[in-house]
Amino acid sequence: MSEEVMKEQTGEYGASQIQILEGLEAVRKRPGMYIGTTSARGLHHLVYEIVDNSVDEALAGFCKNIDVVINPDNSVTVTDDGRGIPVGIHPKAGIPAVEVVFTVLHAGGKFGGGGYKVSGGLHGVGASVVNALSEWLEVEIYHDGSIYKQRYERGAVMGPLTVIGPCKKGKSGTSVTFKPDPLVFEETIFDFETLKTRLRETAFLTKDLHITLKDTREGQEKEQTFHYEGGIQEFVTYLNRGKTPLYDKVIYIDGTLNGVYVEVAFQHNDGYNESTYSFVNNIITPEGGMHLTGFKNATTKCFNDYARKQKILKDSADNLTGDDIREGMTAIISVKIEDPQFEGQTKQKLGNSEARTAVESIVGEKLVYFLEQNPRVAKATIDKALLAQRARENARKARENTRRASALDNFGLPGKLADCSNKDPKQCEIFIVEGDSAGGSAKTARNREFQAILPLRGKILNVEKAREEKIYANAEIKTMITAFGTGILKNFDISKLRYDKIIIMTDADVDGAHIGTLMMTFLYRFMPELIREGHVYLAQPPLYKVEKNKKVWYAYSDDQLNKILTEIGRDSGNRIQRYKGLGEMDADQLWETTMDPARRVLRKVQIDEEAEQELDLTFTILMGDKVEPRREFIEANARFVKNLDV
Ligand code: TSJ
């Protein structure tokens, strides 16, 4: 390493303009390294990076309002009423501190010290990265009766920090406007809903902060303000809206231990899902970590201790598990910590063990007290947990029964299954067909040597919404498990798979798509390896049949139909039939269009890893106002990618 480079790295030349520009060049060269992606997601990330600086100022106690404006040219302005980024000369860099903030990589707001730094989360970037990736950026600072301004283009300083006029005495704050660089981003149009969701989340996590989001683009003018005096307590109420709470109160506990500030809020609803979201310095930790562990330990212990003490749980009974206690629980765990360590492959997990200790002891101590004061809340929760415990026990038995049934192998095969004659699984495929009538056609159409048909009646159970016990009792699900031969979950054994291809064949309409999704969801939850190893396919029946002069064409999409019509000429001799369901095809047609390996089109079902991760982030559940239907849609579909198979 040359001496020059060494010096740069140790920071001795920290203020040099050249080095600064080089630093930001790196950001422009590899933007993904700093903001994860240059897709729409990365674009919106720029706004959060800027807003997070204002949130820091709010957490430090100096800022009450943050305004975010989407301007008509798709630039964004973020304004706060904090102290204003310092304008004085930075002692080491020899230039105004604000210029350092925008031109030196990783120079985010560490001036005064003290307080918690919000930014430095997932990607650990700040204002300079936003600056580097903006076509232009302007900062204005209101401080001591003057307005200071500086402009940058693609990270380069366009002139010195200048006083451009007076401002009201006593007014202070910072305003940053930036226009994302279209040379960097694939998408440069901001989405109001996306920003809204994240800003609402930020407002929930920062009690008493007012955040306003305003769209000033022509034809889309709108404005919304987020302000929650109740903080995360209100967050829980919000998440539980549309559900039936088990008790009125949202339990709220806070406290500080060894420099870790802990806040938790939770409430049970009468459903079966647990929705727990944990945050560190306002950054979501999708994979949890120490703070979440502390919360789970404390709640599990407190509720069990209480249940024993009150004799609700008999001496001879097993302890309630954490899962039993958290069934139907909606919870927010938020900690503020000086130096958060993010762990795990995706750095989404809090590693600081002092966070576990703090959450565990603060929640442990205060929850005991709360339960004694609120016996009805305690009783309702424990009664629900006891039901969960019983259901868990029943599910275990049902699971064992299912396993035993599948162990019966050939003799235990379901009656509805029309199996194939070839016994070599590598050669075999099974069609899961919706409805008895389509099942009938498929049985006639198939090549019985290597193609098996399993007709299913109607919609299969949505495994995301039912309790485990009910899932094992479902006839369609039992049938599939038995037919595949692999077993499920921990007992899954791919070497026992009876077919190389599992082909889901449904009508080419909305209902058919829904059934397909339910099926994929079932497989994903109970036999994910089948999908990951590429054994699951969707059949693709044609949408149209075109006949002309006794010749026949099939079209699998509207595009294809158009192509065919262009080729053969658009005239009155064409007979176009739109297939509404598999049942409309006779066996021969079904064979040649959808089942014959030589002619059919199959789509392989795959898991979209990125979408899957995103599913767990709060913003997906907070999107829009009609959350439930959208959430279901996203959960059901985002996870699967369907690729063309050749
Ligand atoms: F950095 C930035 F450009 F991203 C940005 C920072 C953008 C916006 C909209 C606001 C801010 C910002 C920074 N708002 N408030 C502050 N505060 C400080 O930088 C600040 C002020 C005073 C002191 C002090 O110790 O006196 C310390 C800090 C960090």
Image (cartoon, rainbow, N blue to C red):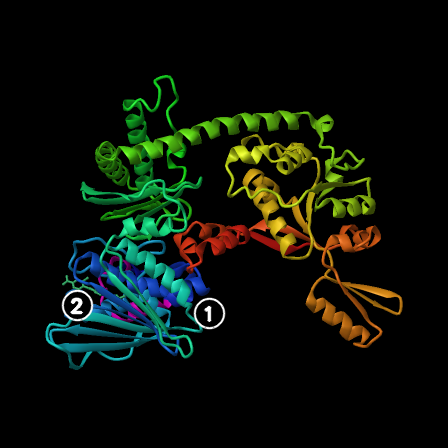
Distance from mark 1 CB to nearest ligand 1 atom below 8 Å: no
Distance from mark 2 CB to nearest ligand 1 atom below 8 Å: yes
- Say left or right for 253 vs 124: left
Q: Quadrant of residue 100?
A: bottom left
The x, y position of residue 88, in whole percent, is 14, 70
**Distance Cα–Cα, label 1 vs label 2:** 33 Å
The x, y position of residue 164, in whole percent, is 19, 82
The x, y position of residue 23, in whole percent, is 32, 65
- Say left or right for 408 vs 357: right
Q: Is residue 579 above or below residue 605?
A: below
Q: Is mark 2 on a helix, strand or loop?
A: loop
- Whether the residues at callouts 1 and 2 have beta carbons within 8 Å, the answer is no
Residue, disc 1? 187
Q: In which quarter of the image is residue 216?
A: bottom left
Which amino acid type is marked by label 1? Glu
Q: Is residue 627 above or below residue 533?
A: below
Which amino acid type is marked by label 2? Pro
User: What's the residue at 43%, 70% (across, down)?
Assistant: 184
Q: From this viewpoint, is residue 538 visible?
A: yes
User: What's the residue at 18%, 68% (across, down)?
Assistant: 84
Q: Is mark 1 on a helix, strand or loop?
A: loop
Q: Which of marks 1 and 2 is in front?
A: 1
Residue, disc 2? 86
User: What's the residue at 16%, 54% (across, down)?
Assistant: 114
Q: What stretch is highlighted in magenta?
A: 8-25
Q: From this viewpoint, is residue 23 visible?
A: no
